[in-house]
Amino acid sequence: MKNEYQECLDACLACMEACNICFDACLNEEDVKMMANCIRLDRVCADTCSLAAKAIQSDSPFKEEICRLCAEICAACGEECNKHSHEHCQMCADACFRCAEACRRMITA
Amino acid sequence: MKNEYQECLDACLACMEACNICFDACLNEEDVKMMANCIRLDRVCADTCSLAAKAIQSDSPFKEEICRLCAEICAACGEECNKHSHEHCQMCADACFRCAEACRRMITA
Amino acid sequence: MKNEYQECLDACLACMEACNICFDACLNEEDVKMMANCIRLDRVCADTCSLAAKAIQSDSPFKEEICRLCAEICAACGEECNKHSHEHCQMCADACFRCAEACRRMITA
Amino acid sequence: MKNEYQECLDACLACMEACNICFDACLNEEDVKMMANCIRLDRVCADTCSLAAKAIQSDSPFKEEICRLCAEICAACGEECNKHSHEHCQMCADACFRCAEACRRMITA
């Protein structure tokens, strides 16, 4: 596997994990209402990262296109998470921004 | 396709839809905190129904085992939804109970 | 739900089914090797349609972007299926082209 | 996260990767027909491992039940892969058996 693919795959798996952990942690917060958008974005971001990981691992002819979408969704999820000071949101924002970056590098590689 | 398979597939797709609609509607409720378990179960139930639909459609060797799991999760999601009077929860509970029943009929058919 | 959303959702679910049926049928053909690209595209197309259906049903903020990707993948899968005269491939090609069209209408609606 | 959960999660992610790589490699083999069952099982096994990983990461109330199903499917996929001498099949069989074992340990932990 090319370096950019491996880095993108690692970033997708790390982002999927951070989003799923953040999804769960948001639902356990005192003020769940404030986290509604975060919960929503965590779900779609985790599922898109999972689709992207599958596409890279199985060398799908659409891995670049899926990673382009993934970069967009990760950027939005990272921005939402960044608004909240909870540790799980900050860790998720980091993973999202890294994944968006890795997806973009993979596309242009 | 055998009758029991078609009925199970229809029920899985209807339940997936009801759970995804309920997931979204719960996140839009005034009191999101009260809906946290519902949101959690809606997600795993929708995704398991989706996996079951894929297994039936592609005649997977594990369609029965996946539908056994699906029946269990649908029953739990239906019970949680049934606790809430919101129309989306009541509709979701109905779809969940129907799907649990259809999965069980499919397994024993 | 807006008309364009409902039509797009229906088309995604029909395409997911046609792709999963075609995936299974291709694996049962005498000449599986000839169907390798079809099998590959059926998988990613079915899974992307499933993600798009989930996004529409749960009113995800990224439903348009996911449907844009879905239109691209459906078009490619339809073209591949169209090369083969098997009934399951022809039915799958139809469902793919309809879904690509419905996704594009939904995005511009 | 409890040790057994972390080990199970790691095993699910490794098995998902091995199955997706094996799916792609089987489709590139000279004799694809001989690999049809392997392709079929790789798909459902990868997707079930992915669902199990999501369930563990998001602390789903059904993580144990999903891992019970995952153990069953991994065992069957491992047995099928073990019949073929291709390196990707042997690596996949290893990952499947490890994952089945980790899922069982997690359930009884």
Image (spheres, coloured by chain):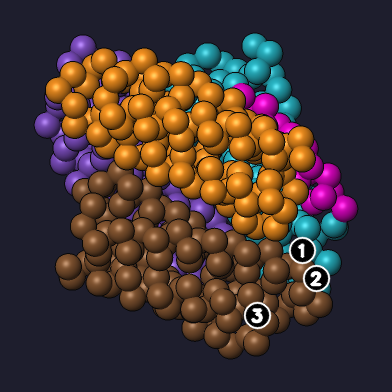
Chain colours: A brown, B cyan, C purple, D orange
User: What are the residue bounds of the magenta stretch?
Assistant: B65-83
Location of the C terminus of chain B (image quadrant)? top right
**What is the residue that sits farthest to the left in this orientation?**
C83
Image height check: is D5 above or below B102? below
Q: Secondary structure at mark 2?
A: helix
Q: Secondary structure at mark 1?
A: helix
Measure how far apart labels 3 and 1 are at the Cα level. 20 Å
User: Is disc 1 on the same chain as disc 3?
Assistant: no
Dots 1, 2 in contact, CB < 8 A: yes
Horizontally, residue C89 falls left or right of residue C13, namely left
Which residue type carries mark 3? Glu
Res A87 label: 3
**Amino acid beneath label 2:** Lys
Local SS, label 3: helix
User: What is the distance, in whole Å, between disc 3 and disc 2 at their CAs?
Assistant: 20 Å
Callout 2 crowding tier (Cα within 10 Å): few <14, some 14–19, many ≥20: many
Same chain letter for marks 3 and 2: no
